[in-house]
Amino acid sequence: MTRLFPWIQTAPLALVLAVFLLVPVGMLVVVSFYDYDAFSLIPAFVLTNYQELFTSPVTWQTYLKTIYFAGITWAVTLGIGFWIAYHLAFVVQNATLRMVLFILCTVPFWTSNLIRMIAWVPFLGRNGILNSTLIGMGAIEQPLEFLLFSDFSVILAFVHLYTLFMVVPIFNTMMRIDRRLLEAARDAGAGFWQTLWCVILPLTKPGIGIGSIFVVVLVMGDFATVRLMSGGQSASVGLMISNQYGAMQYPAAAANAVGLLLMVLLVVAAMLRIVDIRREL
Amino acid sequence: MTDKKISVTRRGALALAGAALGSGAVTGFPTIWAQNIRNITLRQLGTGVSGLNPIAEQVKKDLGFTLQLTVTDTDAVAQRAATQSRSFDIADIEYFSIKKVYPTGVMQPIDTTKIKLADKIVPIFTTGKLTPQSAVAQGTSPYSVGFVENATAKTFATQRTPLMTLLPTIYNADTLGIRPDLVGRPITHWKDLLDPAFKGRASILNIPGIGIMDAAMVAESAGLVKYADKGNMTRAEIDKTVAFLIEAKRAGQFRAFWKTFDESVNLMASGEVVIQSMWSPAVAAVRSRGIACTYQPLAEGYRAWGSGLGLMRHLSGLQLDAAYEYLNWYLSGWAGAFLNRQGYYSAVLETAKAQMTENEWGYWMEGKPAASDIIAPDGKVMEKTGAVRDGGSFQERMGRVVCWNSVMGEDRYMVQKWNEFIAA
């Protein structure tokens, strides 16, 4: 009987995952082999959806673009997130103040994703606050057009939206670092950078790994941010799927989704190889 | 994103029988036994264009039953109709969508012998021609997908039959919207969208089925592509159209592409864009913020769209009767006047006219200067005395429609190429 307990304990979650994750993903894979015309799905086993997907240069361009967004966003959120977490964990000494500052970081999350994105539009626009301020100060003559509806604005929005996903897990692992290790490092003569590189960074790796997975997966699957912030000028895989879905081309969208899924799984697998996140879970 | 549910509160079952009888005496509705009808709810799925709460409230008042509206975007309406047809009873759907949806067999045809005003419907829908002299426009014209031969047919009839796929309710002629204060010169042709003077300040809508038509109007106007039928392009024509779009995009002509009504309003109102594809109520929305915006008539003519109400296959019995009551009610005047006052057109003009003031009718339908302020349905002043509607009268606007929103034979290829344009 006791041998059955673990199975019984995991059964509810396993069941939920099976019904709401495995079955839909299975359906997705099945439909990706269907044929279709303008009016309906035709159950079949054809490879045309994948052929059309992988022989089109647009697909590769779009996948590259998606990786480009994910890469830059990852690097920037990591840079910002790491130092915010460092500051909270090691510089701020007062526990209450630390909690207050941490909650402050989450304040933007009290509004919806969409609102946080759209809020940038009047700020960055041609006649927006930033441009009019700069012109008013005499810093520029013509409004800066690259600020809105460009790759710049897309990445800006991503960083704004997802930095917290980096901060939280890194902060969490940093808080668990035994402070005596830092003292020992100092006693042994290590400077600031040496302590950071040889003690803090290795011990923070699981947090960085978890944060990176959050950010990369969120950015790769995104379509709303790319569409709104690039003004529809840029594409991402998610946006491509949403366009196909909108045109009722479900099999093509499904094939694309399977492609995206594989790519994300590959990236996550690569990250897990570098960082053992289980150590901290 | 724009999914919201509006359900009408059941206001007073009080004296329902009496009220039903009373209104019946006035307008001829309803004919169903009043006790049964109050329990009926018809669920309607449509877009924000005509999924409007005042209509549902008026239905409750005039007919006694509840009309529950779900509002979403054009693509999503077609998707849900095709894949979850039992989740609602009435589809408020565009004619170009019906070309895809009807053949899936989820809808039943409308028996026009039960529609009292069927013969009063504007001839665009019944003969394809506004006047006997005018030509049938290109694209998925409502007439070409408006009728079927029998109840089980999955293809459309080539002429008028007693069975309609959709009861037409609302339609309009679309053109480019401009900021007259910022363009700095008269805009006369579709090709002006490509004028280098508007570099980085133009926009086109990113709904492939509609965007490609605007693009085609521009390409044809600029003499870049000659189409046999803009609404049913060949692969070569699609290639050429998308190639010129990509070229313009690379040259930095477009500031953005919009997908929803609000986006188009914001682009225009903020001055990010000065010339773009636009829909009539979006122009009104920009103007209501006190910003000059013109729905510019162009030499080549208009791109039109139309939508109507369709009955889902599973409707039967008392519910089906109620649905027919509703369809009849829609043509009977109140709804038509309500839509006409927002710049759309109603399917039966006479009954709508009876519900509008002479000034309203003159401004919206006859292209006359407003004799007094034009008031929007929500009570706000929409246009001042003396204003004239952009494009003029109903005849001038609908008479110059050159193509309708479309689903092409090469739809699959077109969407693929459109994605290339967006990704380029």
Image (cartoon, coloured by chain):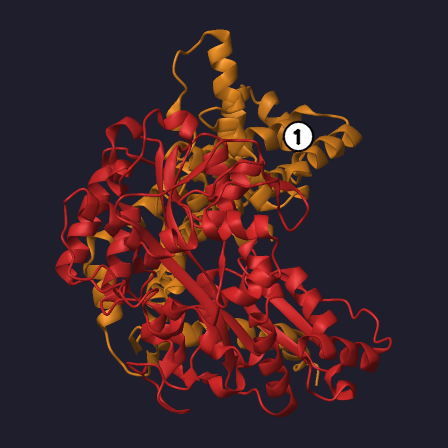
Chain colours: A orange, B red
- Residue count near mark 1 (Cα–Cα under 10 Å), binned few <14, some 14–19, many ≥20: many
A189 lies left or right of B16: left
Quarter of the picture containing the N terminus of chain A is bottom right
Number of numbered discs:
1
Residue A112, x across and y down, in percent: 62, 46
Residue B391, x across and y down, in percent: 39, 45
- Quarter of the image where one finds residue B52: bottom right
Above or below, B123 relative to A185: below
Q: Nearer the viewer, residue B186 or A35?
A: B186
Residue drawn at (32%, 26%), measured in percent from left and top? B185
Q: Nearer the viewer, residue B241 or B393?
A: B393
Looking at this view, name the residue that lies furthest to the top. A138
- Secondary structure beneath dot 1 equals helix
Residue drawn at (71%, 30%), measured in percent from left and top? A101
Above or below, B119 relative to A248: below
The answer to whether any part of residue A163 appears in the image is no
Above or below, A37 relative to B171: below
Please state the chain letter of the residue tagged with numbered disc 1 in the rendered image.
Answer: A
Residue drawn at (57%, 87%), measured in percent from left and top? B315
Q: Which amino acid type corresponds to the residue marked 1 in the rendered image?
A: Leu
Residue B119, x across and y down, in percent: 45, 78
Q: Nearer the viewer, residue B281 or A207?
A: B281
The answer to whether any part of residue A223 appears in the image is yes
Looking at this view, name the residue that lies furthest to the right. B14
B99 lies left or right of B221: right
Residue B204, x across and y down, in percent: 35, 44
Residue on which the image places disc 1? A88
Above or below, B166 relative to A93: below
- Quarter of the image where one finds residue B273: top left
